[in-house]
Image (tube, grey):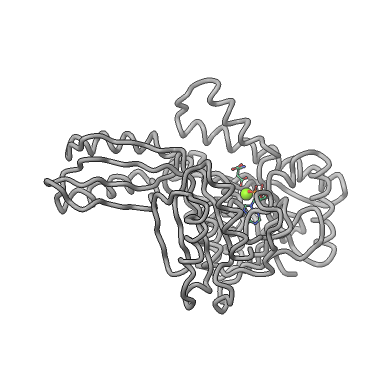
Amino acid sequence: MSVVVQKYGGTSVGDVERIKNVANRIIRRKEAGNELVVVVSAMGKSTDELMQMAHSITDTPKVRELDMLLATGEQVSISMLSMALQSKGCDAISFTGAQIGMRTIGKHGKSRILDIDTKRIQSALDEGKVVIVAGFQGVNENDDITTLGRGGSDTSAVALAAALGCPCEIYTDVDGIYGIDPRRYPDARKLSSVSCDEMLEMASLGAGVMHARAIELGSKYGIEIRVASSMDEIPGTAIKKDMPDSERPVTGLAVDEDESIVTLNGVPYTTQTTARLFSAVAAEGINIDMISQTPQREGTVNLSFSAPTAEIPDLREVLSRYREEFPYKNSHIDENIVKLSVVGSGMRNQSGVALQFFRNFREAKIPVLMITTSDIRISCVIPKEDADKAVELVSRSFGL
Ligand code: ADP
Ligand code: ASP
Ligand code: MG
């Protein structure tokens, strides 16, 4: 019998009725002849609620304790789903990350999966059970519970599929991947397939439908990933590793509302400065994206870069250490921005895409504060207040 990993997100297991619906889907699939390993997220918005609970005790909860708390959300849903299956006569067993040896490395709150010991899963499958696994969590070298970053259950699922050598089906509250978040732009078109490269860019640039690391793992291990609805049987979107470049210049648009721009003015210019700053930032596991630097004037430069807003407290700490070494004049953090990106493998061999993109901003008089590009994306930073207008114009201009 062939194994398949399925993953159901928070909304899909948001209440008892939905858990029963997921149980019915699992049973139908098992009856069709598959062995199932099912990864689930915490019910509904319970991870947000747990986070609020932590912050009602202290503004600065220790990350170890936060992981301990957040991981309980998934423990609720795995046991509920397992009970729902058992009550319908389907043998099932739930496991936490620790129980299946989901070993992680890295910092609490953004750990990465190192290894999974599939022995326990395999023997439960051999006994004919449906295996239910808590997404989003693992254990580190100290046996402490860790989490993989918000949205990380997708990554748990793809990592399990890689360890078991099987396909991965992601079930969520939309019926596939669209050129742009259909809640943001209701006219968006659904994609029947998308390349790993494009999806990785879209996920990293704010398309919250998939956790970026899940795509990275899927691409590395050649896992077949399909994203579809947990509510109906419509075929979703296949994320494929080997796909010819698209004929359309742009496949998707993503908006990242959780980025800020950090500017340091009057940084002493030496060959060391930027390297030292960015190595200190990297050592904290902070991901920065856009970087710009003014030409040197009187021995100093102004340096700007974008970083996730959630990382700003850690970043402030790095900046104050850096200031001791390279005393800069002042710093400024702007949180009122968004990063808007268009992604498409088709732009590799088509000209005029940047012109078509930026013309929208010029015509609507939207200031573009920063720009970066790769061979398959163009990103720019604009004021938050202009985001909706820009999304509408760019989506229409590329027919997304
Ligand atoms: P889950 O809880 O199932 O993991 P998420 O909320 O993480 O669900 O992801 C699904 C959501 O992603 C959708 O409700 C949709 O609003 C959003 N989304 C963002 N970008 C896209 C896109 N390009 N295509 C489809 N959905 C998207
Ligand atoms: N429950 C976690 C979150 O809300 C993980 C996930 O949903 O993938 O971020
Ligand atoms: Mg998700």
Relative side of 72 to 229, left or right: left
Q: Residue 43: x percent and y percent?
A: 70, 39
Tell me the quarter of the picture where residue 371 sits.
bottom left
Relative side of 50 to 356, left or right: right
Locate ligand 2 by image quadrant: top right
Q: Is residue 221 visible?
A: yes
Image point 17% across, 40% down: which residue? 326
Tell me the quarter of the picture where residue 166 sits.
bottom right
Q: Can you say whether 151 is above or below 217 in the image?
A: above
Q: Is residue 131 visible?
A: no
Please identify the residue farthest to the top as the structure is shown: 57
Please identify the residue farthest to the right as the structure is shown: 88
Image quadrant holding the N terminus, namely bottom right
Tell me the quarter of the picture where residue 268 sits.
top left
Q: Nearer the viewer, residue 331 or 198?
A: 331
Q: Nearer the viewer, residue 166 or 388?
A: 388
Q: Can you say whether 297 is above or below 246 in the image?
A: above
Q: Residue 165: x percent and y percent?
A: 61, 68
Relative side of 186 to 72, left or right: right
Q: Residue 327: x percent and y percent?
A: 17, 36
Q: Nearer the viewer, residue 118 or 285?
A: 285
Image point 56% across, 63% down: which residue? 199
Image quadrant holding the C terminus, namely bottom right
Image point 28% across, 37% down: which residue? 319
Q: Nearer the viewer, residue 299 or 129?
A: 299
Image point 56% across, 71% down: which residue? 222
